[in-house]
Image: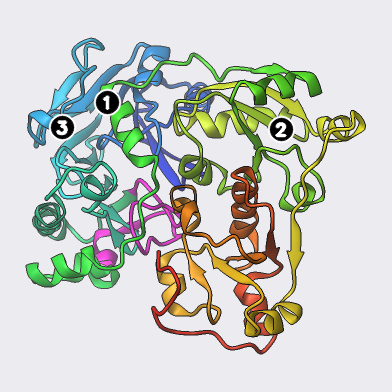
Amino acid sequence: MFLKRFYDDGLAQASYMIGCAVTGEALVIDANRDVAPYLAAAAAEKLRITHVTETHIHADYVSGSRELARATGAQLYLSAEGGKDWQYAFAKEDGATLLRDGDVIKVGNIRVEAMHTPGHTPEHLSFLVTDTAGADAPMGIASGDFVFVGDVGRPDLLERAAKVAGTMEAGARQLFHSLERFRALPDFVQVWPGHGAGSACGKSLGAVPTSTVGYEKRFNWGVGTTKEQDFVTMVLEGQPDPPRYFAEMKRINREGPRVLGGFPTPARAGRSGLQHAIDGGVTVIDTRTADRFAEAHVPASINIPLNKSFSGWAGWLVRYDVDIHLVAEDEATMRRAVRELAMIGLDRVTGWSDARVVSEWGAAGLPLGTVGEADVSSLAPRLARGEVTVLDVRNASEWSAGHLPGAMHIPLGRLEERLAEIPRDKPLVVQCQTGGRSAIAASVLQRHGVANASNLRGGIVAWQEGGFDVVRSTDAVAVG
């Protein structure tokens, strides 16, 4: 048996290839949209991808199952569980085999049994994997978004992200009963989860890639909570705000992701092309570092630096019904950004400009934008005198743990929809934990006409290191 884990840092997402060396067949579970790594791994191991499946209708990235099945001619397997509202609309068109609890996929000598584990979503399947050539019990379970290392899948997304009212508590109770089945598995069974630390599909995911049933029974709070009402209360408590794009991912993955056949290359444009794009209403994403953007940028652009948080913040801040133009340091950076956006279904990248366009813009006599920077030593007295408004763009749990006196709170992902709440009568200092999110927020504010926004260097960490007090309560001007 061959087993390979693939991990995408930007999505904090894991997928798995399971192959049989005897027959050369292979199964891929939970492929993402970039299918090239699966094809390369199969070729390197002299395997043929003959089976493709996924654990559930994903909410945080565009599934690559359809893309990979088309590219390889593999048989596609999809869940038939969850009721009529949770069926894949494209299953018949793609000739998919539908799976129910207890159904088995044979990959050469490897037995892969579907186990219905609802709770995170109604149709969720996990897969028990047995190498029948040398064993009569499962080696591992591909648990998708059901059980993670140190955490369990959140049951509130259907209600909070997809707006399916009244599903949170029912999902939590389903998840509890699914976990009873999980606890009944042998302790030696390995756990291969669909996400790691950084995913919004849970609240306390571990960074260790794999675990065992026995370890999770002892140390995973969700698996170890055996009273139903206690579990329901705990699993619904303290879940982070689901990113806005999750509802769009659910729709795309249920209706059928568009098959790309490779990531596109948008047209390159100079200053005049960028001006034309802006006049046409495109969203301009400047992927350079926050420092470079702060020094000079094309007005009307937003700054989302191309790091491992890029796709997440793009999903929060970029509309799906508008074309996108990228500003990138070079072509390689542009291609990476196109890939990251496509992974969450933002496919409308119609053009790009390299970083020289900023200097070309200025050389043509056109105004350039800048972002000012505040430091904690000068901010403290101004804040005490009421001369400045501080906007905290961190999430709710960070805010509750401690915030600047007199600050107002709007999480970055909700900033555009709450612009009317921001006072315009005095300078605005934007603040997060260390300065990264607040830099993005400052660019969003500038794009929407809030010209007096500056970024607090070092964020609340620098504030506390400077010896200044924080408020540990929910009292605020505006609580997000």
Give the residue type at disc 3: Trp
- Provide the residue designation for mark 1: 107
- Provide the residue designation for mark 2: 327
In percent of width and height, residue 49 lies at 38, 20
In percent of width and height, residue 410 lies at 47, 61
Residue at image position (77%, 53%) is 291
- Provide the residue designation for mark 3: 86
Residue numbers of the magenta segment: 193-216
Q: Nearer the viewer, mark 3 or mark 1?
A: 3
Q: Between 244 and 218, which is closer to the camera in this rendering? A: 244
Disc count in the image? 3
Q: Is residue 95 above or below residue 318?
A: above
* Label 3 Cα neighbours within 10 Å, binned few <14 / some 14-19 / many ≥20: some
Marker disc for residue 289: none
The mark that comes first in sequence, 3 or 1, is: 3
Q: Which element type, helix, strand or loop, lies under badge 3?
A: helix
